[in-house]
Image (cartoon, rainbow, N blue to C red):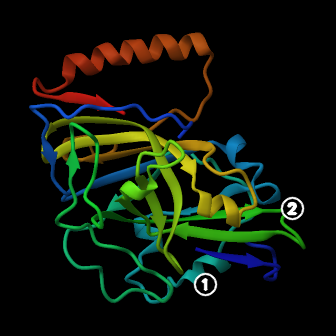
Amino acid sequence: MKINKNHGYPVLAVLAIGMGMVSPSADAAILNAPSGGTFTMNLDRNALAPYAGGYYLSTFWSTATSNADNPANTGDHLLSQLNNTEISGLNQVFELTAIGNDPSPQASQRHVKATSAEFAIDTGTLAGMAGAQVGMSGVQGFYAPNWPPGGAGLVNGDFSLLYDAGRQTLGRTGWYLANNIYFTMAVYDLNNLSLSFTNAENWQFSGDLLMSPENAGMLQGVQLVDVGSFCLGTGAYAGCGQVSAVPLPAAVWLFGSGFLGFIGIGRRPYLSRSVTL
């Protein structure tokens, strides 16, 4: 992550707190580290707006377009290419990295992380393995036109998903998303978690994104505000979390979600289960 202020044309480099208790189940399973999949992020533009004097997503580089293997795609280069016009924060898809060692070589200021072989999720408690991570690639660019003295840009990305029981304060779950471009810092704490799985290789982990205390402090705003949602899908669940970009009346949403729920139940594999926290 890096902030760029007054660099020629200005360029700019997410639960509701309430964590339920889940009792360990006798038939709880351990989900394996994903061998592939996607992490989809949906940001709420209105929730982001109070930060840094007006803050919005202006650029998104996918795994392919941000390609950390290309030495030209340094953090400074991406920051210099940042737009200052708002784009939708919906359906940003980050590809998960392979299990093993961190990709090498990488462009300067890029620190894409490999997925840890020991990464796991306990379906009974939704706890993870300390120090293990799911790596992903892709970069976001944000712009804050009112950040003194004349607008500023910021990039974050090359994220990793981690679990730290020490972050179970202030109603948090311990899960968080860390930025790894320029430097490592927690940017979103995860809450209102939901887990669906068929087996150890096919699962979906979703919930809300809270502005982390670290990121909120840097952006001069309130910590742990719900600023969006996420969905990590592995195996058969890859690609989850896509949402409609066209607002619909509340009644239509209610009908649609119920209808899709029936479809989902009908098509879901027999052994699929769901856990919420």
In this rendering, would 182 be left or right of 44? left
The quadrant of the picture occupied by the C terminus is top left
Coordinates of residue 187 in the picture (x, y in percent): 54, 60
Q: Which amino acid does label 1 sit on?
A: Asp
Front label number (2 vs 1)? 2
Sooner in the amino-acid sequence: mark 2 or mark 1: 1
Helix, strand or loop for disc 1: helix
* Quarter holding residue 144: bottom right
* In-image side of 89 versus 123 (left or right): right
Looking at the picture, which amino acid does disc 2 mark? Asn
Residue 82 appearing in the image: yes
Compared with 154, 71 (above or below) is: below
Residue at 38% from the left image edge and 12% from the top image edge: 259
Q: Which image quadrant for residue 136?
A: bottom left
Graded by Cα atoms within 10 Å as few (under 14), some (14 to 19) or many (20 or more), the crowding at tag 2 reads some
Q: Give the crowd class for mark 1: few <14, some 14-19, many >=20 residues within 10 Å.
A: some
| Number of marks in the rendered image | 2
Residue at the image position 28 percent from the left and 21 percent from the top: 264
Mark 2 touching mark 1, by CB under 8 A?
Answer: no
Is 162 drawn above or below residue 73 in the view shown? above
Residue drawn at x 67%, y 80% is: 80
73 vs 197, nearest the viewer: 197
Numbered mark located on residue 146 in the image: 2
Query: Helix or strand or loop: what does disc 2 sit on?
Result: loop
Residue 45 in picture, x, y percent from top left: 68, 44
Label disc, if present, on residue 107 of the rendered structure: none
Residue found at the very far right of the displayed protein: 149
Say which residue label 1 marks. Answer: 76
Residue 143 in picture, x, y percent from top left:
73, 63
Mark 2–mark 1 distance (CA, rounded to whole Å) = 22 Å
Quadrant of the image containing the N terminus = bottom right
The image position of residue 214, as x and y in percent, is 60, 63
